[in-house]
Structure formats: structure tokens, C-alpha cells
Amino acid sequence: MNAIIRTSGLTKHYGRVHALDGLDLQVDEGQVHGFLGPNGAGKSTTIRILLGLARKTGGTAEVFGQDPWTSAVAVHRRLAYVPGDVSIWPNLSGGEAIDLLARLRGADTRHDAYRAERARLEEAFQFDPRKKGRAYSKGNRQKVALIAAFAVPAELYIFDEPTSGLDPLMEVMFRREVARVKAAGATVLLSSHIMSEVEQLCDRVSIIRAGRIVETGSLADLRHLTRTEVSFAAADPSALDGIPGAHDGTAEDGRARFTVDSDQVALALPVLAERQVEGLRIEPPSLEELFLRHYGDDLAALEGAGTAAGRDDDGTATPGTRAARRAHEKAAR
Amino acid sequence: MYASPPAARRSSSAPLRTLLRQRIRRDRVQLLLWILGTAALAGAAVSGVASSYGTEKDRIELLATVMANPVILMFRGLPSGAGEEEFTLFLILPFLAMMAAFMSVFLAVRHTRGDEEQGRSELLAATSAARLRPLVATIVHGLAANVVPGALTAAVFAASGFPPAGSVVSGVATAGVGVCFLGIALTAGQLMRTSRGANSLAVWILMAAFVISGLGNAIGTPDAALTRLESSGLAWVSPFGWAENSRPFADDAIGLALLPAALGVVLVAVSLVLQSTRDLGEGLVPERAGRVHAGAGLSSPLGLAWRLTGGATLGWAVGGFVTGLLATSLASVISSIGSQLPSVRKIFEAMAKGGSLEQGMVVIFYTIVGVLAACAAVQTISRARQEEAHGTAEALLATPVGRVRWLAGYLAVALIAVVATAGMAVLGSLLGVAGRDGNRGLVQDALVAGAGQALAAGVFLAVTALLFVLVPRGTIAVSWTLVLVALLLGLFGPLFGAAEWVTNLSPFAQAPVPSGDGVDVKGLWWMLAAAAAGTAGALALMRRRELHPAG
């Protein structure tokens, strides 16, 4: 596989703050690669180094096999970028800003093909190009950057939380456009903290925490690392006896639950079939749970702080906290 | 319906107090500088007059010259007599008032339209502060901010042994013009949709009022003793004219000193009415729809830089043109005058060594042209920093545009702005000579002085570029401060008898000037070297500079 983006041992220090702390990231040609992490984990810093807007402190970073700091112009000829919080020029209309960015990326904006593509995207994203920049809402500023990025073909698209501020309809349009450029052979790096978006779009996922990649692989790979939750109707915990591979068995509200390693689900099924259990539900781990596997202790700490502050809490566990607790328990083992 | 719990209910003035505290907190450094600067200017004037014009004879001589050379009145106040006190006020009052006016304009726009444009007002208006209280808080803040420099000015004069009544009138006149421009800027903030637009409108009114008052005095009528001047009707159009006609220490006309403040209060009321009738975020001057497709010019970093700063460049060039026009058209008036008083000659000699009085006037006016050109350069390069802080530079630099090329675009536009400002000034001077059929030699003087001041502005261009590369977050504040310091040294240094080396720290004072039939090159070579090396250095260092967003 031909690596489009490759970093190894990448570090970036701002004074005493280590924004990146030995980051190893590889994005291969034709991939849609999800880059997951909460705010402050180092996603945007990584992207700024990949764009040559910030200089690495140590390690290596390559885009198209070139150093993005020294060969920024050559690298930028082949990519398109959409930041998470788009700023546009207050006294330029949206249409002018799109044309400017497209021209700087080498497009001939008077060419019919470009005009037609821009018109198609404006239609898809329901964007009015006549307003001045200062009059646009956050979502509309985001559309300026998205239309400018998609209107001119690129080999690599870098999106930094691109759908923040977009409504669900526009998110669908965004996913459609990503699918289109992927079909055309482009590579995409999609930084996000919206799990459903990444789950639907990405072939591979890298999870970043405190400036390092803590998990990387295809979604299928990652799922194997975690447990699948199985539940069925039962009155008491004894219903769980003798199920091979079952962990964390509980029985509440008339349902028995247990978890099983994702690659061992099939082993548990014959016993369940034999007992003719009812209301059987098998839930593979969502990306959110994968993510919380790495961030569960943060969440537990936050919830502790929330409870300590006397927050009104009726004690019911949400799916998120359940996953967090499980992750926490697992980490403790 | 929910009743708010009694414990949570606060008096209705609580939000106002909170808003006021927030304004003071936000402005404390900035306002302190303006206020102390104003008081220091008053103090410098007192000691300057004591050292340079210590005797009544000196002062009478200077006033007589001024009456005969009305062009000086463009840059000074209204002569009211030869006493030390009224003479000091003649020299400094318009500038004290101008400081208060600038302080008030920026304060008013910052807390009204500026906040509104950034969306902060919306956040505040959704609280119990509602739509009007932030404006009320700004008004209270602005009025208080003007009382302080007014009181300090009065205190400085009184402490120098000037009579208390006149000191108070001086303070009232200073603060009054400040309040007047508080009202003008608040109204401008209601009319315009952007803080840039509101600031421009208010500053243009300020400059026009200053020039109109100066012109009105210049065409006024002197008394028989040539120590006192009656303003012409034109000066009465401008708040500066009202303030100056209060004549502290001569007439002490407190009513006239209060007149600008009265206009200010009316305009403050107008801004309150406008604020209560319009939608938040909207202006009364409607926004035009933009183009659907970008024009051909908008296709390179240079094109964008021009698009963003071209309008301001035009403004500076117009200022240059007017200054150049005045330089020769008013200087021509002087040629008939033979009085060569030593005290006046001292000033001119400091600025145009050994030249004629006429030539000296051209040099003084072109110092202003140099300041305008430097402002144009600093503003253009500051725009690059604003782009970086705002985040739009990031979008641009993520395309195949190198950092060096991006900065070079702004430097090129800054150079165009400098050349345009100086060039338009020379063109104005040419018209001034042609219009009055004056001394043709002045055109050559204007050309030399214009080229020299363009070079001085070039030094500021290079210094600002270096600041941008090396200390991005300080670019805007430091570069404007340098221009202000150089302006004060260059314009006031000779007047207040500062040592020559102090005056010569200012590039404006180091620019080549016409001297007799030749040219005094002064700092030509080091300024040329500094401008070239600074610009080249900035571009070279930009290769290794990261992007520094705001924060």
C-alpha cells in the first residue's frame, strides 16, 4: 500500500505543553481514514503540521512522501482542506471566497466544468453565494470551505471536524460528497468526534489520546478487541450459568445480560439456542464504546466531579456510562 | 408561570454595574495610556513654552509671525494673547482635544458595534442586560473616561501655577470634545454595519473637524497688536473651533467649552433612540449584495491583499493629496512676508536647514505626508496579522500559496500605498502651485520632500514587516506606537526645543529635504539600507515562521 500520510514519533511542544507526544499515523492511498479524539487531544495540531502551518518539534511527518513544512506549496497543489471553524473574509461574498480558494488551488474559475460543479454543490448544500462573509452563520461559513474543497478535484482531502454547524440534511450531503471523491480514488483524512459519521464513512480509524495514537485499525479489527453485549429475557442471574465465554453477567428488569469477546460470540449461541431464550439481542460494540474504552476513565472522573457537585441524578446508567464503567472495570483487571 | 425566587432577584441596576465593571476591566491598560498621554502632553507643553518661549517678547514675536503666516494655524490653536498661559493653550489645546476625541471614538465603537459584529452583544442581550443596557453602560463608561483626562489636564495646568479658572476651562474643553466624539462614534456605530465602517466614519469626521477648525482660524482676523485672532465663521462649524474659542486663561468662556459636550449629549440620545428601534446586528446603512463570481483581480494573494486594503489606501492617498495641496497653496501666501523672526526661524531651521520660509512650510507639511504614508504602510501590514489572527490566512496557506509569497503580497500593497500617498501629495502640490500661479520652485521642493518622506514611511514598512515575522502578537500595537512616537518627536521635538539627537531618532525628521537649491540628504543612506534590509530580512525569516493564530 502506498502511504499518502505518514508520521512517526511526531512531537509538538508549545513551551511545556506537549500537544503531540510521539504520534504515529499512517493513511494509505484510497482510504477514508477516521481520526478520532476529543477536543484538545491533538487532532488539529496534527493537521496543522501535515499542512505545514506549524512546525514539528521532533519525529517525521510526510505527506505524499514530502516534508509538509519545507514543501508546503508542492504538497498543497494536491490536497484540499476544510477547517473545523471556518473564517471567511467579512467583505467578500461567499461566491468570491469560493472562487478565490479555487483559483489558488489552480482551477480556472471561468471554465464551464468548474462553474457547473460549483453550481451543483451550491444546489446540494443550499448555499446562497451572494451574501457578504460577515452575514453568514457558522454552518454557512462551513459550506464555503466545503464547496471550495469539493469543487476542485484533489488527491487528498483533509477535513477537521467538517460538519460542525451543519444540519443533518447537510451532513448527508457531506457524506455523499466524500463517497464521490473516494470512488474517484482520493484519500480522505477525517478528523471528528461524531462517531456515527466516522462509522458510516471510514475504512480505518485512529484514536488519538494526549498526543499519541492509542488505537488504529479497521472498524472490524477494532471490534474484535472489545466485547459484544448479549441480552435475553430472564428472571434471575441463574439463567446465565454455563454459557461459554460469558463475562459481567447481570439480571435486571427481567433481562439477563452478559458480554462476550467479539470473536467468541458464535461459541455462546448453541447454548442460548438450546435454552430457547426469548427476546435475544446481540449488540456489537459501537464506535462510541470503542472510543470510551480509551477515554472511559476520563468520563468516570468527569461523572465523579458532576455527582460531587450535587447534580440531580436519578441513578440510572445511560449506555455511555455503562460502557465507561465496563471499560473502567476492564482497565482495573 | 414561574416566579423568580426572592433570593435570586437582584436590583435592576445590577446588570449595569456588572457591564460597567467589565468595560473598565477590558480597557484599563488602554485607557490609562490615553489618559496619561493626554496629561503628559499638557505637561510637556507647559515646560516646552517655559524653555523655548520664556519671555513675553519671544511669544509676541511668534504670535505676530503666526498671524502673518496663517498656515501655522492649521497645526496650532487659536491665539488669544501673549501671556504664558494662553500661549501654551494656543500651542496645545487642539491636540489635547484630539487625544480625548480619538480615545472616545475607539472606546465607543469597541463596546458597541465591535461587540455586536463579533456576536458578543447577542450573548449579552439575551441576559437581563437586554438590548439597551450595554449601550447605557458604554455611555457611562465613555463619559467617565473623558472626565478623568479633563480633570488631569486641569490639574497639570493648575499645578504649574496657572490660574485655577482657566485650568478648569481647559479641562472642560478637552473633555467636552471627547464627549462630542463619543456621541459621534456611538451614532456612527448605529448607522454602520461593521466596526471598521463605524471607526472610519467617526475618524473621518474627526479629521475633517480638526482641519475645518484650523482653516477657519487661518482665514480669521487678527487684532491690531497681532497677539489675538478672531476665528472666521468656518471655525464655528467644528467642535474644535468651539473648544478653542473658550480661550482658557484669556476669556474663560465656560459656555463655549461646554458646547461640544452638549452636542455629544444630543448625539448620545440619538444613538439610544436608534438602538431601541433597530434589530440587533443590523445597521441603518443597508448591506449590498455581493458578487456571485469573483472578479479577475481576485486570483492571487496580492489580489486579495489589495481587495482587503485598497479602500484604506485610497483614504490615505486622499489625505496625502489634500496635505500636498495645502503645502504649496498656503505656502505661496507666505512669500510676500519679510518678517524673519528669530524664534520662528529656529523652528524652520530645525526642519529645513537654511531654506526659505516657504520651503520650510513645504517641509512641515510633507512631514504630515510622511506620517500618512507610514500609517498606510502600517495599516496594510497589520491587515496581514489580522488575517492570521482571524483564521482566514490559514485557509489561504492551505492552498498552494507559500508563506513568503503571501507576506510579499501585503508588502507590495504597502509599498503601493506609500508611493500613492506621497505621489498624490506631490500631485496636490503641483495643483496648488498652478492654481495660485505661485513659485514653481516649490514643485521641486515638494518632489524632494515627498520622495524623502516616502523613504521614511518605507522604514516603518520594513519595521512593521519584521515585527510581524518576529513578534506576531505585538505587530499592531508596537508598530502604531512607533509611528506615534516618531510623529511626536518629529513634529513637537523642534517646537519644544528638544535636543537635536532626540528629534533625529524620528525617521520623519531624518528624511531628505530640499535645502536652498540643493538637497540635504540627511539620513537617506541609512534609511534606504534599513528599509531594504528590513524588508528582505522579513521575507527571509518568513520562510521559517509558523502560523500564529489569535490567543
Image (spheres, coloured by chain):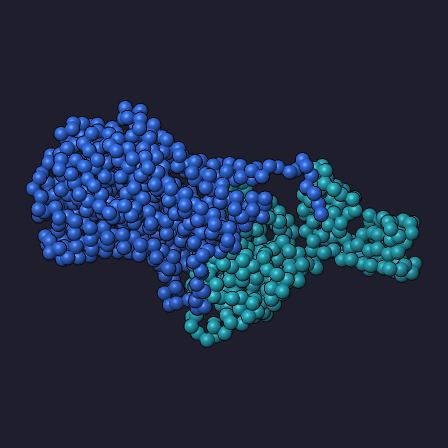
Chain colours: A cyan, B blue
What x and y, as percent, mark residue A215? Answer: 65, 51
The answer to whether B148 appears left or right of B6 in the picture is left
Count of numbered circles on the image = 0
Q: Residue at x 50, y 70 (%)?
A: A118
Residue B378 visible in the picture: no
Query: Which residue is outermost to the bottom?
Result: A112
On screen, residue B98 above or below B384: above
The answer to whether A260 appears left or right of A308 in the picture is right
Instruction: Tell me where residue B231 sits by quadrant.
Output: top left
On screen, residue B194 above or below A330: below
The answer to whether A250 appears left or right of A108 in the picture is right
Q: Residue at x 62, y 47 (%)?
A: A209
What x and y, as percent, mark residue A229? Answer: 79, 54
Query: Which residue is outermost to the left?
Result: B338
**Which sits in the foreground, B507 or A7?**
B507
**Which sits in the foreground, A163 or B496?**
B496
